Amino acid sequence: METHFLFFFYCCIGLSLVFAEGAQMNNELSSLLSIKSVLVDPLGNLKDWRSPNGSVGTDGIVHCTWTGVVCSPSGFVEKLDLSYMNLSGRVSEHIQDLTSLASINLSGNLFDSSLPKYLPNLTSLRSIDVSMNNFIGQFPIGLGQARVLRELNASSNNFAGAIPEDLGNATLLESLDLRGNFFEGSVPASFENLQSLRFLGISGNNLTGRIPRELGRLSSLETIILGYNEFEGEIPSEFGNLSNLRYLDLAVGTLSGQIPAGLGKLQKLTTVYLYDNNFLGIIPPEIGNMSSLVFLDLSANQISGEIPESIGDLKNLELLNLMCNRLTGSVPTQLEELTNLQVLALWKNSLTGILPPNLGNKSPLQWLDVSSNSLSGKIPKGLCNSGNLTKLILFNNSFSGTIPLGLSGCNSLVRVRVQHNLISGPIPNGFGTLPGLQRLELAYNNVSGQIPQDFFLSPSLSFIDLSHNQLQSSIPSGIFSLPSLQTFIASNNKLDGKIPDEFQDCPSLALLDLSSNGFLGSIPDSIASCRKLVKLDLKNNHFDGEIPKSLAAMPTLAILNLSNNSFAGQIPENFGSSPALESLNLSYNKLVGQVPSMGILTNINPNELVGNPGLCGGVLPPCLQKSSSWSRQQKGMHVYHIIVGFAIGTSVILCFGLTFFVGKFLYRRWYLYDTNYFYGRWFKKGTEEWPWRLVAFQRVCFTSGDILGCINESNIIGMGGTGMVYKAEIHRPHVVVAVKKLWRSGSDIENGEDLLREVNLLGRLRHRNIVRLLGYVHNESDAMMVYEYMPNGNLGTALHGKQAGKLLVDWVSRYNVAVGVAQGLNYLHNDCYPPVIHRDIKSNNILLDANLGARIADFGLARMMIHKNETVSMVAGSYGYIAPEYGYTLKVDEKSDIYSFGVVLLELLTGKMPLDPGFGESTDIVEWVRTNIRDNKAVEEVLDPSIAGQCKLVQEEMLLVLRIALLCTAKLPKDRPSMRDVLMMLGEAKPRRKSVCYNNNNDGQNVAKDRPVFSTSPVIGLL
């Protein structure tokens, strides 16, 4: 009986356990459905997460087959992988019901909420990956309770506050990645308990204080990435005890002191990045003991002393970057023994002596940059022995001897920059046949002989500077027809002969400088076919004949200097109507006749016409009528002499009397009249020359004379809508400003009042995204406006000009420019009274400061909107940016600015100009984008591939802004948002800070965790 009872008892217990397990499985299924209910799943990745029709038994564990769900053999959810599914929404607190969960992966999604505070209740967790999202708030406290936790990755989010102290209790933790957040405070002291930790990444936060010495006791550490923070003090000497360390990245911070010699004990270390800090002292010789070292970057510090010879013992070294320090002494000859060296960057130090003569003989050298030192001797002959050399940068040294013949046969070369040295001898043949050579700079040397004939064969040369040498002979035939040639400078040589008449096909030529040579003959008429030519400098030669009229019709020619030649005949009448000409110098020729009175010639500086005795009229003294009868002229000479003598005598007598009265009148008019009298008159054309006067809107440390001394051709940096812009550098005290010399013509938009309007407006506007007007310099007839100087030029140049690919190379920086412009426009539209309408928003009118911040400039067309729906007398603005309704209504309101802003957004997104022949039948960028969308093409195709690439995360961020751009460029003004709304939408489309794109990894494992979130060495991309 007792036996039967025990049997019945155990059966009951077994059945209860079975039913309990079944109930728990049902609970997990319900929990998963609850988790799904608060997720946004636009791609339907979780469409199989559906409630089953019947009950779930032991043979029907339906949820274990769902996407991303992995169960244990007993049927409980053990792993949840929802990575890279484009999910958003929030993470449900029901996740705590999955009590057997060991791994959770939510990486690569769009979550922008906080993590549930109940997450630490999952004490069985071994792996947590929530990286590459937008999670906010504080990181959950309590994960230290997960005693078996081995991997935690929360990188590339927006977590803030302190790093939880209790993480130090997760003593089995092997990988901790918190990079790219907004954590602040110091590194928790409890981290010294993480003795199993192999990977520690906390870079790209706002952490402060000193790097804890306790980290040097974590003997298992293999990777440390702490850069992009605000740590202070030295590198702890205890780091020398990390015998397993392979990767050390402390770059971009505020660390100081000396580099610890103890790092030399780390035999397994392959990578050391300490660049962009404030390290002092010498490079410790012990660094040569790091036998496994591959990448060493100590650039942009304050390191002094000599380069240790022991670096030559680093046989695996591929990258050595020591640029921008204070190093002295010579380059160790031992470097030529580094058989794996690919990059040697020593730019901007104080090195002396010669380069190792066998450098490159034994190594696959790709990049050599030793510019801006005091090196001398010959250029090593074997730099390209491996056939890998792409960039040879040696400028600003004292290298001598000839150019090695091996360089002219180096097919891998892309750039050769050897200017400002003492190189002599001829340019070897072969550079013109190199398939990838883009830039050849040999200026300021003693190079002699001829320009090689093979230059005209080059398929890739875009920049050639041979100026200030001893070159002779003539220009090679066909050189100006190179398909990629943009700049050709051969000034200050001994070249002669005629310019080849072969300009019929010069598709890219923008700058041609042949000044200070011995060229003769006439300017070929075919030069007018260079439709992109901006600057033509032929001064100081022996050209003769007439100036071709076709020069004035060149659409982009802005600077023309023909001075000190023998040009004859008259100045072409059509020069005054040239569409772009801003600087013209015809001095010291043999020109005759009347100076045309139109366009640029109406206010040209007389000094730019001096030395032509036969010229008269216009800005020069008036022309005298000559008699056709020589005898009649002779008869009148006697009377003429009498009249002249009488006039001179009378003038002398009256001079003293008039001087007093005129001086008194000038004093009263200039100094006693109210300043506003001149403020309103200096745009009006007068017949008298008055002194230049500086009117400042704030305290300045320069005079009008300082400004005028900088207004010359060599200082031109751009052209605005109302004038040419110069860079003015004043030395005592040192200050740099931008000066816009205003254009004057009878056809100024809206009767010339736009010039006064710009001064009047900018003098009152105060906003960080509006360019600041410091003052203006004027006389009776001309004016120049003085602005703060923007070192990075304008947005148009950064996107489409010479700076393309160098600035704004990531989406975050372009997004910040968009927000800056939007903030400036919001200020004009909503914070100014009356509101200000700019009317000429375009990329060329958006300047970039030293931090790539956006500043709106050029207010020559701006209007204060006193009444709604004001109209103007004519269309003003720039083609491609003008709102469609502006052409037929002429109404002025803020919606026209918003349309132009939308076009700028499209430029930032696509990298294309508003008007591009590549658009085909589409008239402009707006129509091109909308056509691509209407044709059901992948929207991502319109995005700039250099920014978006194949990175889905960045593409999604850019597509959010694309939607805003399309709203701003709506055809009907009423459909466009206000700038307040635009700012709000841009705030919601903010990209993740320092986000990184990894490839999709379906197994849920950490992806390339040994790669830092941010750019590594500045030159690592070469390798």
Image: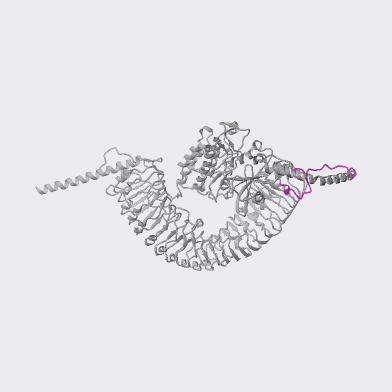
Q: Main secondary structure of the magenta part?
A: loop
Q: 203 or 245, which is in the foreground?
A: 203
Q: Residue furthest left?
A: 1
Question: Which colour scheme appears in the figure?
Answer: one colour
Up-down: is 120 above or below 837?
Answer: below
Q: Position of residue 454 (x, y in %)?
A: 65, 57
Task: State left or right for residue 135 relative to residue 851.
Answer: left
Visible residue check, residue 536? yes
Specify start and end residues of the magenta stretch as a single range: 605-634
> Would you say residue 314 sits in the magenta stretch?
no
Task: State left or right for residue 489 relative to residue 901.
Answer: right
Q: 841 or 926, which is in the foreground?
A: 841
Up-down: is 815 above or below 197?
Answer: above
Task: State left or right for residue 476 relative to residue 545.
Answer: left
Q: Quadrant of residue 20?
A: top left
Q: Position of residue 497 (x, y in %)?
A: 73, 55
The residue located at (36%, 50%) in the rendering is 128
Report the number of numbered marks: 0
> Would you say residue 631 sits in the magenta stretch?
yes
